[in-house]
Image: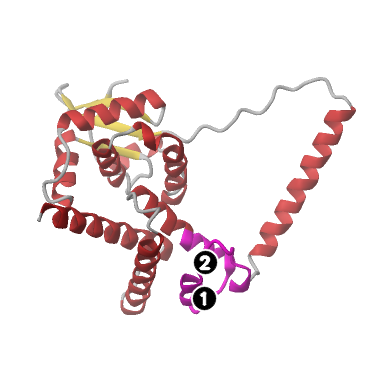
Amino acid sequence: MNLKSGNIEGFEQYSQFSSLKEFNTHFEMWMSIHKVDFSKGELVGLKGLVRFDAKVPGVCNAKIGTILKAINEAYHDNGISRSTFKRMVQKAKDLGLLTVHETERKNGSQSSNLYIFNRFPSNEPPKEEKVNHRNKTINLLKTNNQKIIKRLEETSKELNYTFVSDRIPQPFVQLIKYFFPEAKTIEEYWHMVQIAAYRNNYEKQKDCVLDIAIQSFRQLIRKMKTAKGIKQPIAYFYGILDNKFEELFVQELFELGN
């Protein structure tokens, strides 16, 4: 496929995701299975590539040099090499996580690559078989379950913080309930915390994750009270989380070097 280089907004048609949240969810599912297939340096490169997908969810059009420069600056020169980045891209392509196309300048020379993140594959529906009593029973159960799930989803919109999952730490619930008392909203904010922690390799450090989650939410509220134009607080919250985890990672690297 021959593509012409240009502004990233011109490649929106290649995105497979309706929002950044949907992209993050699919990326998290990919990582839950294939994180072990990448080295630590390759994961840094993959994360750096993901950061370039903010404008158009799941699509990045940038030169390798530009991406590596951003990674090395973020990690204070404790970044990765071009060969490590290329090795990561090849692994991601082989796994089906990435599709890569070369783009051309107007004069025909190669400009940069178009990196397209793919959706996490779901199981294909079973082929239609001859209907029998057993299949009728299964279909009836599925229909009833779908109705129950729909009713639960509708009801969950009205549930307050007392119905929040017990997997979410109470200190976080007690803070956020004053601003967003709905159980579903609190769980969505905590889901962002889990994604950010996982992508920065801190998911096992529960006390650290909780501390950063509380700090980030307080920063979000301060920003919302002092600034206008924050149309998607949950996306802004995720950006704060990601920055704080990065700062912590850089700090730990610096301490290891001393």
Q: Which x, y percent locates residue 154? A: 68, 60
Do the residues bearing badges 2 and 1 touch, measured as CB atoms within 8 Å?
Answer: yes
Q: Residue at x 71, y 52 (%)?
A: 149
Crowding at label 2, few (<14), some or many (≥20) Cα neighbours within 10 Å? many
> Dividing the image into 4 quarters, which one contains the N terminus?
top left
**Residue 109 in magenta stretch:** no
What secondary structure do most residues of the magenta stretch adopt? helix
Mark 2, residue position: 186
Q: Residue at x 32, y 48 (%)?
A: 55
- As rendered, which of 92 and 62 lies closer to the eye? 92
Q: Is residue 240 above or below residue 73?
A: below
Farthest right residue in view: 133
Q: Which x, y percent locates residue 217? A: 38, 70
Q: Residue at x 65, y 69 (%)?
A: 158
Q: Which quadrant of the structure image shows residue 209?
A: bottom left
Is 96 left or right of 145, judged from the image as shown?
A: left
Which amino acid type corresponds to the residue marked 1 in the rendered image?
Lys
